[in-house]
Amino acid sequence: MNNKIWLSSPHMGGSEQKYVNEAFEGNWIAPLGPNVDGFEADLVSFTGARHAAALSSGTAAIHLALIMLNVQPGDEVICQSMTFAASANPIKYVGAVPIFVDSEEDTWNICPDLLRECIMDRLAKGKKPKAIIPVHLYGMPSKMDAISAISQEFEIPIIEDAAEALGSHINGKNMGTFGDLGILSFNGNKIITTSGGGALISDSENYVREARFLATQARDKADHYEHTKIGYNYRMSNICAGIGRGQMEVLTNHVEKRRANFNYYKSELSGIDSIKFLDEPLGFYTNRWLSTIYVEPTLNREISKKNIYLDLLQDNIESRPLWKPMHMQPIFRDAPFYSNGVSELLFRNGLCLPSGSNLVDDDLKRIVSLIKGVFK
Ligand SMILES: *Cc1c(COP(=O)(O)O)cnc(C)c1O
């Protein structure tokens, strides 16, 4: 059996263990400590956001962001349908109602025209949505200029889900810093990992201070334990943050390697008519967290993404269909959805190829030659 090639596996840079050892030596085996402070400072300096809170997951960050925006039971929150469930699940945690919006073809992310239609329709139905959650799927930035303009026009704040997009930017402005609040993820499969973790970033000191307070069980100042708010245990541990500090040192390398993966796939596979790649709109820079292809099944003898998926699998190579949109998920069956058909086509015909920053040339060659073989 050939060696396993993963879709996106952890890739340590080398100095992670140094920071973890420091945590052991200082006995900072806790959800606070120098690595947590250091990692937050790294995130601030890399993204350009004024403040960052390191948390136990990206999902926790979205949950806290919704609480910061005072989203209450019964409120409506608009969310990109083409995403991973963790973008939308926290809407349910706070008892609110998700309203899903379809994607557009240039970025595969939330369609600004449809977003506007959706807001007008919700307003006509008598309810003003409390937040908008755009997602930068696979690292490709959403059209934040248009989305921010709509947010300002209707005075609806943005929670930017940049879980997959650390290192992506539009004209030099990093993803996660366009919205009122942004969230990042450091799950094991993301572009950098803390084994599991996330962050909330914002220019608002109040939001980040309050989120930190809630994330550490909302303990009021007192000698005894005193609580005037419901708290959460959402803080990142000082051990995990040590891994994060080491990973920040190699983030830029990871972005370059992932972009090189994409460029290799594109140059090798562009001869196959039915395989399409998603290019960057002008001024957009994607970290290419995952390299994705769109397979037109009507060309090339009806060969579909499923054929590629299965042939790769047989050779011990992991690929994955593009994420199944939220409006198609059983858990969100009853949620309103503003549709143009794009995300369903993406799900039906799209495939994520192995994309790790630790792939070697032989891995990439093996993958490409198998895909070419499918079309022989
Ligand atoms: C990974 C991911 C999340 C959740 O992050 P966790 O750290 O795994 O909780 C949220 N949104 C998107 C788009 C993701 O890919």
Image: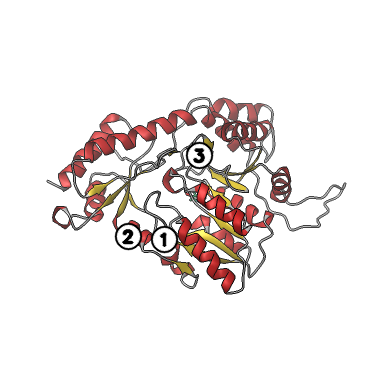
Compared to residue 61, the image places residue 122 above or below, namely below
Give the distance between the C-alpha atoms of the residues marked 3 and 1, in whole angstroms: 22 Å
Left or right of residue 188: residue 149: right
Query: Where's residue 353, x and y in %?
Result: 32, 44
The structure residue drawn at horizontal position 62% and vertical position 48%, both measured from the top left corner, is 181
Examine the image and state in which quarter residue 126 appears.
bottom right
Q: Does any atom of ligand 1 lie closer than 8 Å to the CB of label 3? A: no
Image position, residue 174 (x, y; %) = 53, 38
Secondary element at tag 3: loop
Answer yes or no: is residue 148 visible: yes
Is mark 1 in CB contact (under 8 Å) with mark 2?
Answer: no
- Nearer to the camera, 2 or 191: 191
Identified by mark 1, the residue type is Pro
Q: Residue at x 35, y 42 (%)?
A: 279
Q: Are marks 3 and 1 in contact (CB under 8 Å)?
A: no
Pointer 2 or 3: first along the chain: 3
- Relative placement, left or right, of 317 versus 224 is left
Name the residue that disc number 2 marks: 345
Provide the secondary structure element on which disc 2 rests: helix
Q: Residues within 10 Å of mark 3 (few under 14, many from 20)?
A: many
- The foreground one among 197 and 252 is 252
Kindly identify which residue carries mark 3: 166
Horizontal relation, residue 102 to residue 318: left or right: right
In this rendering, the label closer to the viewer, 1 or 2: 2
- Residue at image x 55%, y 33%? 243
Indicate which disc, 1 or 2, sits on the residue closer to the N terminus. 1
Q: Which residue is mark 1?
A: 325
Tell me the distance, in whole angstroms, between the alpha carbons under discs 2 and 3: 26 Å
Q: Nearer the viewer, mark 2 or mark 3?
A: 2
